[in-house]
Amino acid sequence: MAGNLSRADARTLTETIDRIASTLQNHHATFGIPEKVALDFAYRCDLISDTVEKTAIDKTAEAAVDELGAEVSGPIFEENASPDLKGQFTQKDFSELTEMAEKLEKKALSLRQMADDSVS
């Protein structure tokens, strides 16, 4: 997984983390772990799982955006284009979409920081 985390690898990892967290949370007394510690551990495991899955999704999305955002000279032309397709995905559309994605990313980061600050 060095450098490239696939969605399948991320899912396998997070399922394992979630199983461990659930086991400790539900059977903390059996292991001699205080309930408060087990709940905190489960919460932190959930944060890690979310981050791992988001990282895998982001890498997939980045690859798609790189492909979609490639600039070409003129409109894309296909000889057998579907008659249902009207218009084109222009550079202006791409720019607007990129701006919206950046705003969403900033909002997600600020929400994540707020969550991290509330945990600390």
Image (cartoon, rainbow, N blue to C red):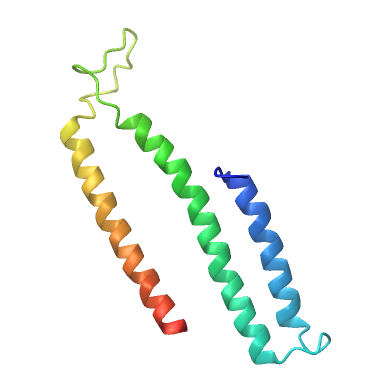
**Is residue 106 left or right of 91 when viewed as pictured?**
right
Rendered image quadrant of residue 94: top left
Q: Residue at 69% across / 73% down in the picture?
A: 21
* Of 83 and 94, the residue lying toward us: 94
- Quarter of the image containing the N terminus? top right
Residue 12: give x, y in percent of width and height.
Answer: 68, 53
Query: Which residue is at the far left?
Result: 92
* Of 5 and 98, the residue lying toward us: 5
Q: Residue at 69% across / 91% down in the picture?
A: 35
**Numbered circles on residues, count:** 0
Q: Residue at 33% across / 17% down in the picture?
A: 82
**Is residue 43 left or right of 113 when viewed as pictured?**
right
Above or below 70: residue 76: above
Query: Which residue is at the far right?
Result: 30
Above or below 61: residue 86: above
Above or below 89: residue 78: above
**Is residue 73 left or right of 42 when viewed as pictured?**
left
Query: Which residue is at the far top?
Result: 79
Q: Residue at 36% across / 76% down in the picture?
A: 114
Residue 119: give x, y in percent of width and height.
Answer: 47, 83
Above or below 116: residue 17: above
Residue 48: give x, y in percent of width and height.
Answer: 56, 66
Rendered image quadrant of residue 92: top left
* Of 8 and 86, the residue lying toward us: 8
**Is residue 44 left or right of 12 when viewed as pictured?**
left
Residue 10: give x, y in percent of width and height.
Answer: 61, 52
